[in-house]
Image (cartoon, grey):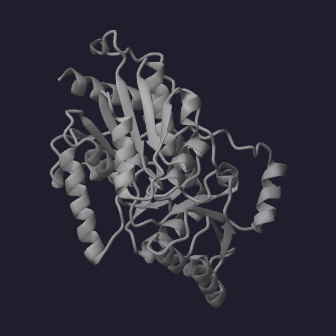
Amino acid sequence: MLGTAHRPSHVPRRRPRSHARVSSTPVPSSYGQTPLRAVQVLGSGSGAGAHVRSLTAGLVAHGLRVTVCAPGAAEREYGFHRAGARFRPVDARTTAGRVAAVRSACAGASLVHAHGLRSGLLAALALRGRRVPLVVTWHTRPRAEGAAARGVRLLERTVARAAAVVLGVSSDLVDRARERGARDARLAPAALPVPAPPPVRDEARRQKVRAELGVVDRPLLLTAGRLEEGRGYRPLLDAARSWVRLDPPPLLAIAGEGPARSALRRRIEDEGLPVRLLGRRDDLPELLAVADLAVLSSPWEARPVLAHEALHAGVPLVATAVGGVPELVGPAAELVPYDDPWALSTAVTRLLADPLRRARLSAAGRVQAAGWPDEENTVAQVLGVYDELTAS
C-alpha cells in the first residue's frame, strides 16, 4: 500500500549507494569540454529522494555538475552533497520565496530536472523568461476529489505544457501527461535500490520472528504502507473477515503508521478480525522473509516498494491491478480488481491452499525482478534525454 507521493512510514531510512553503477555507459560526446550543469528540483513529500540521490551520483560520475534544490530535511536524509552535488536549500515559507531560491540556483544551468508536479510548477515559474530546457518526472498521481481534483488537473496541464520532456515512471502516468498536453512524454521507470539480503537465514531465527508475530502454526500475510483513508484498507479488512473461517486462519500483519490507525484498530477489535497492526517498522525485508504471502490492495500505485521487495525476496504477491503494478510485476503475481474484497479474499485463499502455485510465483518473482531497470539504466536514459535537449 505504498504510495509514491509520500515516503512510506515503514520503510527504513536506508542511505542509497554513494554512486550508481554507471561505468558501462559512455558520456555523450555533445557535452564537450564544458561540463553540463543540471539542476535537480525536489519538493517535500515527493517520495523521490532516493531516486534523485541515485541519479545525482550517476550524473556526477559522468562529469556533470549537479545542483540539488530541495528542503534542508531532504539533504539531511539523503546527503546529496556526498554524491558530489552542490546543495541549495529551498525552505522559504512562501511560494515567491521558493521560486526565488530555485531561480537563483538555476542561473547558468544547462537544463533543469524537476521531480513531482509541485516541483515542476516551482521550476517552471523559476525559469520564466529563460531559455533553459525543463524536464519533469511524474512519480505519482495526486489523490483528489471535487474542486481539489479540478485544481490538480490545472496543475498537471500547467506542468505538462511547460516541460520540454515529461518522464513518467509508469505507462499510465505517461498517458496522463499526454492527455494534459505534454509535447513529449516518455516512460522512464525510476530504479529502486536492490534490497539487501534479509538477515533471517536459518529456520530457528525464522521461527523466532514468526513467534514474535504470533504465527507459529498459521500462515502470515504481510502488507505495508501509511495508514490513511483511501489507501485500500477498507476492502482489505473486508477480505480479512472471510479468512476467519479458514483452518487455521491466517494473520494479516500491517506494517506502517498514520492517521487512520485508531479507526482501523477499532474495526479490527469490533469485528474480531485476524489482523495485527505492527506500527512503524524498519525491517520490511526481515518481515517478508518470514511471510507466506504479501498483499497489496491499493487504489493506485506506480512502482510500489512492497511489490518491489516482495518479488526480489521471492514472496508470492497478491495485488490490485492498478496504475503501474501490472507492468511492474508481469506474470509474477496474482492480480485482482481494486475494491473487490471477494476477489482479493479468493485469490489469497487459493494461494494458501496451493503450495505449488506459490513456489511458481516465488520463482517468477525473482526472474521478473532481475529484468527491472537498474540504476545504471536509469542514469543512461536520463543522460540521453539531457543530450537531446542540450544538443538542440
Q: Is residue 116 left or right of residue 241?
A: left
Query: Where residue 286 sits: x, y (%)?
Result: 70, 50
In the foreground, 382 or 89? 89
Query: Where residue 136 sits: x, y (%)?
Result: 30, 43
Q: Is residue 318 left or right of residue 265?
A: left
At 52% from the left and 49% from the top, the residue drawn is 361
Above or below, 21 against 236 in this view is above
Q: Is residue 375 visible?
A: yes
Q: Is residue 375 left or right of residue 121?
A: right
Report the number of numbered marks. 0
Question: Residue placed farthest to the bottom in the image?
Answer: 270
In the foreground, 130 or 221? 130
**Which corner quadrant of the image does residue 18 belong to?**
top right
Query: Where residue 289 sits: x, y (%)?
Result: 68, 50
Which quadrant does the C terminus fall into? top left
At 80% from the left and 49% from the top, the residue drawn is 203
In the foreground, 155 or 370? 155
At 53% from the left and 40% from the top, the residue drawn is 366
Q: Is residue 330 visible?
A: no
At 59% from the left and 77% from the top, the residue drawn is 243
Query: Where residue 165 sits: x, y (%)?
Result: 23, 39
